[in-house]
Image (cartoon, grey):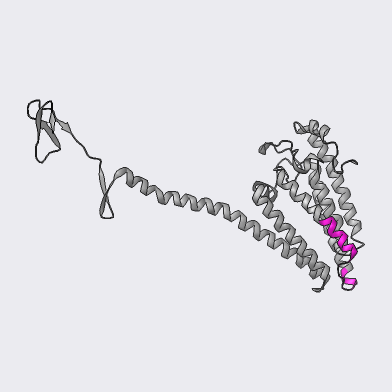
């Protein structure tokens, strides 16, 4: 090879090329190499290879963090169904209670569908509903245990009637109950899917950027979840063939109406944009009535 018409000669044992006349020297420094597993690799390639296990570890941890809550939620739902079924049948003292088994099956299927929908479209709501919310309104902390006791009373009365009566099979009243139960739970699940602020407690969720939701069922009524819950509650005496259970069921519905009024007042006063939303969607629970 040549430079300005003069030949270059290589000085042996060196990384230096020197032209005969001009004595211009070029120092050629190869990229550093380190030996790994019996072969040489460029340093930057080796660094990239060393990061691969780290990235794999991060992916495994992320997958684990995503899967573990689902497993825990699944176990919690299973435990809830088992405990619920146990309480019903132990108190009824009759494992042959047909309506009881059917009701537990409906209850379990509904919980599974609800969980699957939330995991698919609104997974963050699951975590929020499992914890205790800060800044819950004082009146709601009084309302919640009263409502829970009333709902428990529905099953207590139904179980007591089942212990006294004979085995029953689904009839016309049961079909009516199913016709109320199914759309009721459908409305509840739909409300939970579209509303990321569907927590257990009444509060303004400033920590989560609380805003007005006006899509899905909220385009037709301001509190569709309560309408669905009311339907589920009223369907229970019919599904369990218990006349006496209608008394606590009606009390529970009245409590839901009271909470609706108090919550609506809170949202009017404290949630920006809710007053304007209320002018567009006029009815709290039942379109055309209230």
Magenta-tinted stretch: 162-181
Instruction: Tell me if I can see residue 64 in this picture.
Output: yes
* Side (left or right) of 191 relative to 208: right
Q: Position of residue 69 (x, y in %)?
A: 61, 54
Query: 189 or 3, which is in the foreground?
Result: 3
- In the displayed structure image, the side of residue 96 where residue 10 appears, left or right: left
Residue 17 in the image, given as x and y percentages of width and height: 13, 34
Q: Position of residue 5 (x, y in %)?
A: 10, 27
In magenta segment, residue 197:
no
Q: Is residue 254 above or below residue 106?
A: above
Instruction: Give the camera-side residue of 186 and 6.
Output: 6
Q: Magenta segment, principal secondary structure?
A: helix
Count of labels shown? 0
Q: Residue furthest left?
A: 20
Work out whether residue 171 or residue 149 is closer to the camera in this orientation and state it: 171
At a point 79% along the width and 69% down the height, the residue shown is: 89
Picture quadrant where residue 148 is located: bottom right
| Image height of 224 relative to 2, above or below | below
Horizontal relation, residue 49 to residue 156: left or right: left
Question: Splitting the image into 4 quarters, where does residue 70 fall?
Answer: bottom right
- Please give left or right for residue 139 compared with residue 40 in the image: right
């Amino acid at each position: 090879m040549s430079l300005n018409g003069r030949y270059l000669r290589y000085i042996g044992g060196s990384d230096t090329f020197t032209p005969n006349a001009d004595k211009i020297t070029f120092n050629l420094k190869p990229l550093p190499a380190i030996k790994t597993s019996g072969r040489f690799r460029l340093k930057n390639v080796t660094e990239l290879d060393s990061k691969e296990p780290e990235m794999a570890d991060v992916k495994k941890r992320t997958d684990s963090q995503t899967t573990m809550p689902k497993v825990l939620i699944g176990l919690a739902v299973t435990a809830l169904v088992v405990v619920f079924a146990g309480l019903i049948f132990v108190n009824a003292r009759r494992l042959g209670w047909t309506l009881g088994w059917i009701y537990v099956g409906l209850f379990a299927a509904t919980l599974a569908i609800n969980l699957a929908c939330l995991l698919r479209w609104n997974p963050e709501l699951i975590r929020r509903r499992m914890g205790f919310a800060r800044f819950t309104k004082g009146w709601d902390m009084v309302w919640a245990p009263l409502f829970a006791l009333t709902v428990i009373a529905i099953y207590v009365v139904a179980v007591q009637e089942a212990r006294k009566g004979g085995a029953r099979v689904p009839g016309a009243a049961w079909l009516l109950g199913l016709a109320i139960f199914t759309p009721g739970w459908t409305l509840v699940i739909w409300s939970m899917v579209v509303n990321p602020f569907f927590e257990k407690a009444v509060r303004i969720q400033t920590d989560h950027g609380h805003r007005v939701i006006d899509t899905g069922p909220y385009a037709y009524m301001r509190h569709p979840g309560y309408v669905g819950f009311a339907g589920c509650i009223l369907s229970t005496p019919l599904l369990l063939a218990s006349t006496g259970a209608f008394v606590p069921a009606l009390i529970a519905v009245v409590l839901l109406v009271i909470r609706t009024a108090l919550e609506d007042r809170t949202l009017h006063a404290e949630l920006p944009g809710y007053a304007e939303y209320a002018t567009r969607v006029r009815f709290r629970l039942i379109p055309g009535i209230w």
